[in-house]
Image (cartoon, rainbow, N blue to C red):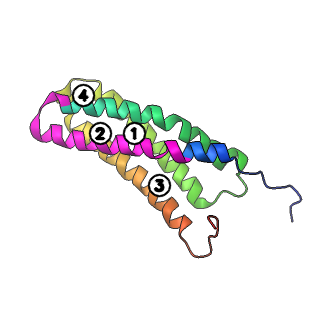
């Protein structure tokens, strides 16, 4: 039995995380759609639009990832679930892939075609896995966190 009190949750940090966390996912999904359209049409505007969406997604991903890092590995490391840790690692790998994707999209539009599309797809799949894992955990029987 531990006599150390559990750290209280920061309502402001949870609010900022809840507000900013969906934005990178939307940007990366839109970038993947733009990559698909560019691969079918070869109109450079779609590739440049995908590049900008990836950059904006990365910019908006910084704060939620730092809050998640603090929550899972520093503040709540004793009470963090395996799902929280999986979500952290999946999101970290997705951000690394998105950074690589930003470099791929900084090249000539024609040079970004199969690699950029694959990186966008893998980024979206990884982020989807993280979102699904957290959603399944929050709706699991016996989880009364939201009540």
Q: Is residue 99 visible?
A: no
Mark 3 lies on residue: 130
Q: CA distance from mark 4 to mark 2?
A: 10 Å
Q: Quadrant of residue 114?
A: top left
**Residue 31 numbered tag:** 2
Where is residue 137? Give x, y as percent. 54, 65
Q: Which residue is more in the foreground, 77 or 19? A: 19
- Image coords of residue 103 (percent x, y): 34, 27
Q: Earlier in the sequence, mark 1 or mark 2?
A: 2
Counting residues from the start of the chain, the first of labels 3 and 2 encountered is 2
Residue 99 position in % (x across, y down)? 40, 33
**As rendered, which of 77 and 26 lies closer to the eye?**
26
Give SS at disc 4.
helix
Disc assigned to residue 48: 4
The alpha-carbon separation of the residues under discs 3 and 1 comes to 15 Å
The residue identified by callout 1 is: 97
Instruction: Point out the frontmost of discs 4 and 1.
Output: 4
């Amino acid at each position: 039995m531990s006599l150390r009190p559990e750290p209280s949750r920061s309502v402001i940090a949870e609010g900022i995380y809840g507000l900013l966390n969906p934005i990178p996912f939307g940007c990366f999904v839109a970038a993947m759609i733009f990559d698909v359209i560019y691969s079918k049409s070869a109109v450079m505007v779609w590739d440049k639009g995908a590049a900008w969406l990836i950059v904006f997604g990365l910019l908006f991903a910084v704060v939620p990832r730092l809050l998640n890092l603090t929550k899972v590995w520093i503040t709540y490391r004793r009470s963090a679930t395996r799902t929280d840790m999986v979500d952290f690692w999946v999101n970290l790998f997705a951000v690394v892939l998105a950074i690589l994707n930003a470099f791929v999209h900084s090249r000539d539009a024609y040079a970004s075609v199969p690699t950029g599309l694959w990186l966008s797809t893998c980024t979206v799949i990884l982020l989807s896995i993280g979102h699904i894992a957290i959603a399944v955990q929050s709706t699991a029987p016996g989880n009364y966190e939201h009540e």
